[in-house]
Amino acid sequence: MSAGRRAAPSASTARTQAGIAEVLEGRRRGPRAFLLFAGPAIIASVAYMDPGNYATNIQAGAGYGYALLWVVLMANLIAMLFQALSARLGIVTGKNLAELSRDHFPRPVIGVMWAVSEIAAMATDLAEFLGGAIGLALLFDMPLLAGMGITAIVTYALLLFEGRGFRPMELIIGAFVGTISLCYVVEIFIAPIAWGEAGAGLITPDLPDVAALTIAVGIIGATVMPHAIYLHSGLTQHRAQVRDDRERRMVLRYSNLEVVLALAAAGLVNMAMVMMAASAFHAGHSEVAEIETAYHMLTPLLGGAAAAVFLISLIASGISSSVVGTMAGQLIMQGFLRIRLPLWFRRAVTMIPAFVVVAVGANATDALVISQVILSIALPVPMIALIVFVSRSDIMGPFRIGRLTQAAAVLGAVLVLSLNMVLLAQAFGLAVPGLG
């Protein structure tokens, strides 16, 4: 899958492909063998650390302390399952989720799926693009529009590397993921975390009020991402050239291990975001709900280092997730419609909502949170399609999922659908028992 003009594969891609072949033939083993298969889940994990997560996690921690950590944990477990299933689909079938949807669903269904997925892609890019621009504007004291311009140029430049094969982009995105993770390791050491309260918040489901419900749905929308479910199947569909079912099983084992490790790291980063906001703001500044306010208040509360690290992680998150979002948007359009747009045009189209938000003077953080709610409402489309395909023996053969995995996937989809229905009921003024 390529988002731009195809160039000659890079030396790193060729070396990785040769190494994968050696592993599948049994001529290479050990931890270094696993590293050859690492990459797709790392790219997908960026979707779970994007600026939309910053917005919802700051509101969760500031407003409710550690009480909504269980939502982050639940969302991350659902994400692990669905990313593993998406990778499985690509590895086994050699097609991505959008292509299989086009091949197996009626034309009207395909049209609806594509429209919903495009809306989700634009909502995704709104969060990612705005987040990177906000970080640059705050760190370098520049206008937000200037930050948006720099973010656009940098993301487009990075996208050009995708034409050189899969490995350069995996290494670039991996460096951004490492930067974000390191930043939050630093934040955890700076912020005085109430570990007992954090532990209780992880295992005690609680939604104190309607606003908490909105944030909970936003957390799920920011964590289990529609475009990441589509993208992961595309990242794995041609990466390893397998010749038989034995080799497929081997690739699946490596893929599942990578998903667990990459998504566990992303989940810990999200928990660290909530805990940092809870530690810094909940006790005396629970009204903090914006990224800009959080940055300005971190300096007097935790020091300039904490504020600077926060912005560096936000910039890394915005740029890397914007790159990944554009890759996913291209895959979705090509898979559903067999249309490939020029890279610059695809990048421009997905940037339009972000520029509109800034031009009309809307609150950027509010726009980020709303975009995550939109994503959560769009999420059941790829989730349901994925469950259908990986459960079919005519598509997956001996690799179709078992009843236990299928039940877990259905339960995850039902949880997301249920939260969405409650949110919509609230939006239309209907009373929901247990929520005031």
Image (spheres, rainbow, N blue to C red):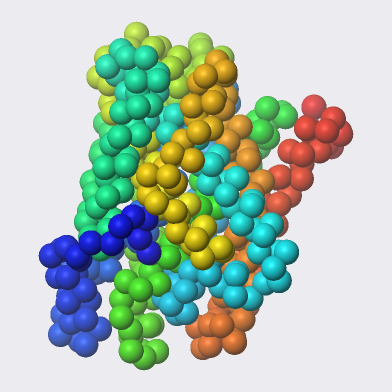
Measured as percent of width and height from the top left, residue 33 is found at: 20, 72
Q: In this view, which residue lies farthest toward the top?
A: 300
Residue 108 image position (x, y, % from top left): 73, 64
* The N terminus sits in image quarter: bottom left
Q: Left of 70 or right of it: where is 193?
A: left
**In front of the other: 287 or 343:** 343
In front of the other: 44 or 32 = 44
Res. 60 visible in picture = no
Q: What x and y, as percent, mark residue 390? A: 57, 75
Q: Is residue 421 visible?
A: yes
The number of callouts visible is: 0
User: Vertical placement of 356 versus 24: above or below?
Assistant: above
Q: Is residue 145 left or right of residue 356?
A: left
Q: Which residue is nearer to you in this view: 391 or 432?
A: 391
In the figure, residue 207 lies in which quadrant? top right
Q: Which residue is found at the position 72% from the left and 29% from the top?
A: 210
**Nearest to the observer: residue 33 or residue 241:** 241
Dividing the picture into quadrants, the one containing residue 356 is top right
Where does the image place residue 328, in percent across and percent down from the top left? 45, 54
Q: Please, is residue 21 above or below residue 7 in the view?
A: below
